[in-house]
Image (spheres, rainbow, N blue to C red):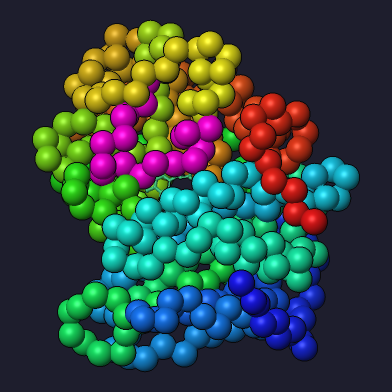
Amino acid sequence: MEIKITKNAHCAAKPADESKLGFGKVFTDHMFIIEWDKGCGWHDARIEPFGNLSIHPASTTLHYGAEIFEGMKAYRKADGSIQLFRPEENFKRMNRSAARMGLPELPVEDAMEALMALLELDKDWVPHSDGTSLYIRPFMIGDDHFLGVHGVGHALWLIILSPSGSYYPEGINPVRIMIEDEDVRAVRGGTGEAKCGGNYGASTRAGMRAEERGYSQVLWLDGVDRKYIEEVGAMNVMFKINGKIVTPMLNGSILPGITRMSILELLRAEGTEVEERRLSVDELIDAAKSGALEEAWGCGTAAVISPIGKLMYQGVEYEVCGGKIGPTSQRLYDTLTGIQWGKLPDSFGWVCPVK
Ligand SMILES: *Cc1c(COP(=O)(O)O)cnc(C)c1O
């Protein structure tokens, strides 16, 4: 792939106070774009100064939700070097999301080449403070310029970068979660296992209602029986019940998280039993009542591990692990973040250095 590079002549100053970065608010000097047209395929790969896109008002993405994305991080190690965590898995998943949405697939080698070229230019934007990272957001939009409902004929595939602060600037605080029994986020055969903007659109109302009631996220139930646990907010979810780790099996409506996959691989490698199966809300609530529910946590790239301290279901609140982070959640958090920031050896071959 040939990438035309136009350097930004007005590079911004790097944020002086990394503790004020927050998430996804600051962007680097450059962005990557490649275009796709039916007939001629991928063309015009380029890196340009970061800036607004010019979008036709009839663009498919604005009307019919043709959009997918990914999320990963570049981590700065203590020695100053930079590494990624399983980036090929993100690009492979992006292609699966693309296939589901009728969007074109970009070969993983090309996506990796694009990311490395962009990081080469903007690597000084990877923050240095503990727990900070450069958030990487690849995304693709369908961009035909007419209102007919049709297959995608023109698409844009981009990467933007955003230096982001520590997810836990004040230490890990378990969150309060509301079990959602009205709205559903996805159904089997729908787009639940694709990382697409539409799933987030469908989730917004429930998330807002939960926030109004003092909960930080919702725990989603399946869309058919409204009975089986699926995900928490935009994270996968895991429980420790009677000493065993249980997580909902991938059923077509759950997003296959790379953090989820890595945790399962870690646990299995150390000989810990994990169950990927259907878990009903009744079983979960019974376990919470009897004390069999020892720990609960969400997992995803942003938080890595987000312990659940309280669960609310049909007006009753259940405390999990005394409202504190449990030993398994803490150990998984320490191990994964240790590998990601290069503080622990990576015996799985997960990390990928950035030159
Ligand atoms: C991205 C995402 C996750 C977590 O995936 P990771 O690869 O671990 O970051 C889980 N659920 C949803 C809905 C997501 O969009």
Between 149 and 304, the one lying in front of the other is: 149
Residue at 64% x, 29% y is 348
For the magenta stretch, what is the residue range?
Answer: 246-262
Residue at 58% x, 58% y is 109
User: Where is residue 157 shown, x and y percent of the image?
Assistant: 48, 72
Q: Where on the picture, by quarter, is residue 95?
A: bottom left
Name the residue furthest right. Answer: 79
Horizontal side of residue 42 vs 85, given as left or right: left
Residue 38 visible in the picture? yes
User: Where is residue 212 shown, x and y percent of the image?
Assistant: 32, 52
Name the residue furthest front. Answer: 39
Quadrant where the C terminus sits is: bottom right
Horizontal side of residue 353 vs 148, given as left or right: right
Q: Where on the picture, by quarter, is residue 215?
A: top left
From what the image shows, is residue 157 above or below residue 256?
Answer: below
Quadrant where the N terminus sits is: bottom right
Residue at 51% x, 18% y is 268
252 within the magenta span: yes
Horizontal side of residue 76 vs 98, given as left or right: right
Q: Where on the picture, by quarter, is residue 57?
A: bottom left
Q: How many marks?
A: 0
